[in-house]
Image: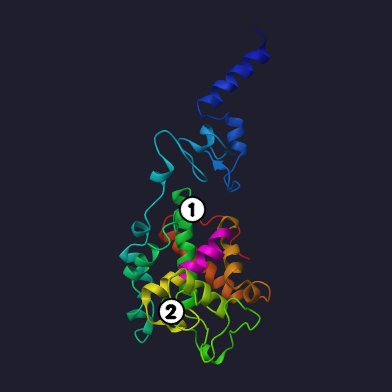
Amino acid sequence: MSSNLLLIISLSAILAAGAMPTEMVMAQKCGCASNLCCSQYGYCGTGEAYCGRGCKEGPCFGSSVSNSERAVAVEDIVTEKFFDDIINQAGEGCVGKSFYTRDAFLAAVKKYPQFGKGDSATQSRREIAAFFAHVTHETGYFCYIEEINGASKDYCDVSNKVYPCVPGKKYYGRGPIQLTWNYNYGAAGKSNDFDGLNSPEIVATDPVMSFRTALWFWMNNVRPVLSQGFGASIRAINGAIECDYGDSGAVQDRIKYYLEYCGLLDVSPGRNLSC
């Protein structure tokens, strides 16, 4: 048998066992595309050798650990301590301290059960860290329920005929993600069984509905781009002002909170932090 044939057989046996040659291992790093797995050796690919035992990131699977077992429950990540450590940083005079609660958040998550359910525990923890990073920035550690001086601003898009503004109603920022504009209130209300155009105030008076509108915005506008990195989530929320017009202070603020929460949740932050 030739030496070349022996080499091919040997490599096939190694790959079948889920191992990688040392030379290849040393040359690879994590940071795979969203549809690829990062193997236990730091190599990107698909199949059992990459997505099975020891898989670090991506659509992992394996005979001993299933995707469902890899997924983590949101309530196990967002513990009382995690939530309280955020809201307790708000000042004593903050109206949000008696409005926002962990129970209201978890009740809202039941409406959006896919929130925080990534293909791996890493993705789940990153999503939750990202959500609370943006919420912390938008509300000042859950201090604000409504946008500061929001009532003085015009958030009525008269060109939108699907969700037309109701005279006398204001569609300024309310809730954890500071929902704004008539078209967002209309669509969020439709998805959550309330009249967002006629009763936008409910986002600032019902804590569960407040979190539900935030999760509605997240699942429809932010979650689809999370695989591109935290920076893409900044753009999805307020890209026109913070990314395109250079509000670097706000961008760095969001990144700071994200890195902090990734640390608390014991997960790497991933790539592309800034927009």
Instruction: Look at label 2 and name its amino acid.
Output: Val
Q: Is residue 28 left or right of residue 262?
A: right
User: On residue 231, which mark appears?
Assistant: none
Q: Which residue is mark 2?
A: 203
How busy is the neighbourhood of tag 1: few (under 14 within 10 Å), some, or many (20 plus)? many
Front: mark 2 or 1: 2
Q: Main secondary structure of the magenta part?
A: helix
Report which quarter residue 205 is drawn in.
bottom left
Is residue 124 among the parts visible in the rendering?
yes
Is 140 left, or right, of 220 in this rendering? left
Q: Secondary structure at mark 1?
A: helix
Residue type indicated by callout 1? Gln
Decide if residue 267 is in sight here: no
In the rendered image, which quarter contains the N terminus? top right
Left or right, residue 110 beside residue 29: left
Instruction: Please tell me whether residue 252 belongs to the stretch shown in magenta.
Output: no
Whole-Å distance between the Cαs marked 2 and 1? 28 Å
Where is residue 174 drawn, in percent x and y? 47, 80
Provide the residue designation for mark 1. Answer: 123
Residue 10 in which image quadrant: top right
The span shown in magenta is: 214-225
